[in-house]
């Protein structure tokens, strides 16, 4: 197909292409952002369905609905779908939509690579889902019962579904690295004249740090799973002690990726909060420079404390002390961020629209998850909590508020900008309350289950744990089903109609930034002439 | 149809930075050093 290059003046009347080619061949950051967000929504429901099956099984002690292998398979798939399928693509969707609008750029720096980054994802998701489905076919081998950490030697013994999973991880990694390169190049080279790095919106800063983290750690995971593939099929012994290898080596490689991955999931949502809170507190963000510094500190320290996930493997006293102290140190910059958010709200003229409700909820619940994280960072305490339901409660309190609720806040905050319609505020608030109450009923009791000794990743449990599990499962059903309301609100807002108010260019009274200077919804091409920043 | 959003100098600059970052990613993958160490061991064993 020939390519026609248009000059700016000619392009003014050029609207969006139509039909399926608009999406398949798209190089437009807004369209690709929409694709990312839709993809993430589908994966959210798939991952959520597997979580609800897990909780349905755990409703009562004994084996009720599914067999243990399928249970473990669901645990693995739930994590992978949520992390790689839902949260990361949703954050990339927000980045695609908002970064060029925020920095006054006409598009991402490498638009065709942007298209490639997205369209690798459906292929990766297919491989991921196949890894779940393949064992159900004759000759499909055993199910993936390793959890998302895919530790050898178990992962060497799993059937061919592990090969699908390894290929899926490779594809997801390529997509993430390409998207990260694009975001870094856009942020460093495409900012409007006058927008220095220290004038850049905080969401852009969080993505700059996130993208660097991705480039540094995803290739290490790729190396690790490649070695795993070699051990499985090509006779190597990287992780096989009988052949001179070491299975703990894989744990180090995995967590060198896996721990910074937590910050990769968190930081974009911190960026969203840095816009939502000032908007609804009607005050500038408190301590912009210290936020940037704290974020860089979190990323730097977060890169070198991975082995706190491995205290029980038998490291030297010096090593565990280092990893313990390093991990606890992270609470200082994270605490600084929380302090800045509270200081921004202090004496602000606050209103509590849905994005702000999520922001306040995040501060409370994420701080709680952080506190249980400090408990887990302490080596002797972790020896007791390790692989218990306490850990499950902890990381869901960190990742649901810290990452997913932040993304919800972002969607509610920017949905009027994207669609030109204000969402139904009453339904938005209803969604927040059902969602947050369901979340807490699900995960708060799991702290007690873990402290009382209930192990995680096991299908059955002692009858003494029944009451809290019943409560947790009821909460999970409320929590899971509440997302149907979210879907309804999004569809209703996209479709518009007489019942919804129209959004002006500036959807929120207190909103500031270049993204609010363009129409709602924005034209297909924006900032073809770069704005001048003073 | 493609809209011209970058002049040639900016495009060159963007592509150059992208290659540098891609190289950094490749460097990190290849320096998950045990990969190469063990691959060499394997190659050594095979040639014996």
Image (cartoon, coloured by chain):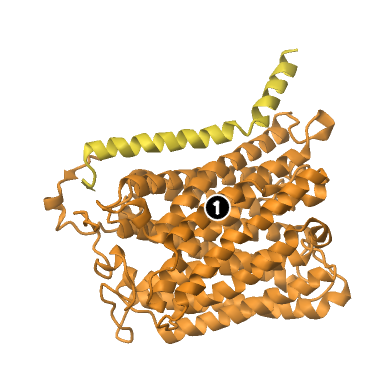
Disc 1: CA contacts within 10 A as few (<14), some (14-19) or many (>=20): some
Q: What x and y, as percent, mark residue A47?
A: 60, 63
**Local secondary structure at mark 1:** helix
Viewport quadrant of the C terminus of chain A: bottom left
Residue A292, placed above or below residue B9: below
Front residue of A447 and A90: A447
Whether residue A530 sits left or right of residue A94 in the image: it is left
Q: What x and y, as percent, mark residue A425?
A: 41, 84
The answer to whether residue A82 is visible is no
The answer to whether residue A79 is visible is yes
Q: Residue at x 83, y 58 (%)?
A: A380
Chain B tint as drawn:
yellow
Residue A521, placed above or below residue A313: below
Front residue of A247 and A157: A247
- Determine the chain carrying the residue at label 1: A
Residue A333, quarter of picture: bottom right
Q: Residue at x 43, y 78 (%)?
A: A489
Residue A510, placed above or below residue A73: below
Residue A225, placed above or below residue A356: above
Residue A94, quarter of picture: bottom left
Q: What x and y, as percent, mark residue A347?
A: 44, 81
Q: Residue at x 23, y 63 (%)?
A: A523
Whether residue B20 sits left or right of residue A454 in the image: it is left
Viewport quadrant of the N terminus of chain A: top left
Chain A tint as drawn:
orange
Q: Residue at x 24, y 44 (%)?
A: B6
Most extreme residue toward the top is B48
Write down the residue under mark 1.
A297
Q: What x and y, as percent, mark residue A278?
A: 40, 72
How many numbered marks have been drawn onto this rendered protein structure?
Answer: 1
Front residue of A307 and A476: A307
């Amino acid at each position: 197909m020939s390519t026609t290059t248009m000059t700016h003046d000619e392009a003014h009347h050029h609207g969006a292409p139509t039909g399926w080619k608009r999406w398949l061949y798209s190089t437009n950051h807004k369209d690709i952002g929409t694709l990312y967000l839709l993809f993430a929504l589908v994966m959210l429901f798939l991952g959520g369905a597997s979580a609800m099956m897990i909780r349905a099984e755990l409703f009562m002690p004994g084996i009720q609905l599914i067999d243990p292998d399928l249970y473990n398979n669901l645990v693995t798939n739930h994590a992978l779908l949520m992390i790689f399928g839902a949260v990361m693509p949703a954050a990339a969707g927000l980045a695609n939509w908002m970064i060029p609008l925020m920095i006054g750029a006409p598009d991402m720096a490498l638009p065709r690579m942007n298209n490639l980054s997205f369209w690798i994802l459906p292929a990766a998701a297919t491989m991921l889902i196949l890894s779940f489905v393949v064992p159900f076919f004759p000759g499909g081998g055993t199910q993936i019962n390793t959890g998302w950490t895919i530790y050898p030697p178990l992962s060497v013994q799993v059937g061919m579904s592990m090969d699908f999973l390894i290929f899926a991880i490779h594809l997801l990694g390529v997509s993430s690295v390409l998207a990260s390169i694009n975001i870094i190049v856009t942020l460093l080279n495409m900012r409007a004249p006058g927008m220095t790095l220290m004038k850049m919106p905080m969401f852009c800063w969080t993505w700059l740090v996130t993208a660097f983290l991705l480039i540094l750690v995803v290739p290490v995971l790729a190396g690790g799973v490649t070695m795993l593939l070699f051990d499985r099929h090509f006779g190597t012994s990287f992780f096989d002690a009988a052949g001179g290898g070491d299975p703990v080596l894989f744990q180090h490689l995995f967590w060198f990726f896996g721990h910074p991955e937590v910050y990769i999931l968190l930081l974009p949502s911190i960026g969203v909060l840095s816009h939502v809170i000032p908007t609804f507190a009607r005050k500038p963000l408190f301590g912009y420079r210290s936020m940037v510094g704290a974020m860089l500190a979190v990323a730097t320290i977060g890169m070198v404390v991975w082995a706190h996930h491995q205290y029980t493997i038998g490291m030297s006293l010096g090593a565990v002390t280092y990893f313990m102290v390093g991990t606890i140190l992270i609470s200082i910059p994270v605490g600084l961020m929380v302090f800045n958010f509270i200081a921004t709200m202090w004496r602000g003229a606050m209103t509590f629209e849905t994005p702000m409700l999520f922001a306040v909820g995040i501060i409370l619940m994420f701080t709680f998850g952080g506190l249980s994280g400090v408990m887990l960072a302490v080596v002797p305490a972790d020896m007791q909590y390790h692989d218990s339901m306490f850990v499950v409660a902890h990381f869901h309190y960190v990742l649901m508020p810290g990452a997913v609720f932040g993304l919800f806040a972002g969607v509610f905050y920017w949905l009027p900008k994207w669609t030109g319609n204000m969402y139904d505020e009453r339904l938005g608030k209803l969604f927040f309350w059902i969602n947050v109450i369901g979340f807490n009923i699900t995960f708060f009791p799991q702290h007690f289950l873990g402290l009382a000794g209930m192990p995680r990743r096991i299908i059955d449990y002692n009858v003494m744990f029944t009451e809290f599990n019943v409560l947790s499962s009821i909460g999970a059903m409320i929590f899971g089903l509440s997302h149907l309301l979210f879907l309804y609100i999004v569809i209703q807002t996209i479709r518009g109609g007489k019942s919804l108010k129209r959004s002006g260019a500036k959807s929120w009274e207190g909103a500031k930034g270049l993204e609010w200077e363009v129409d709602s919804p924005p034209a297909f091409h924006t900032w073809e002439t770069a704005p001048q920043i003073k | 149809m493609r809209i011209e959003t970058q002049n040639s100098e900016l495009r060159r600059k963007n592509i150059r930075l992208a290659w540098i970052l891609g190289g950094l990613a490749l460097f990190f993958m290849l320096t998950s050093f045990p990969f190469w160490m063990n691959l060499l061991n394997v190659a050594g064993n095979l040639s014996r």
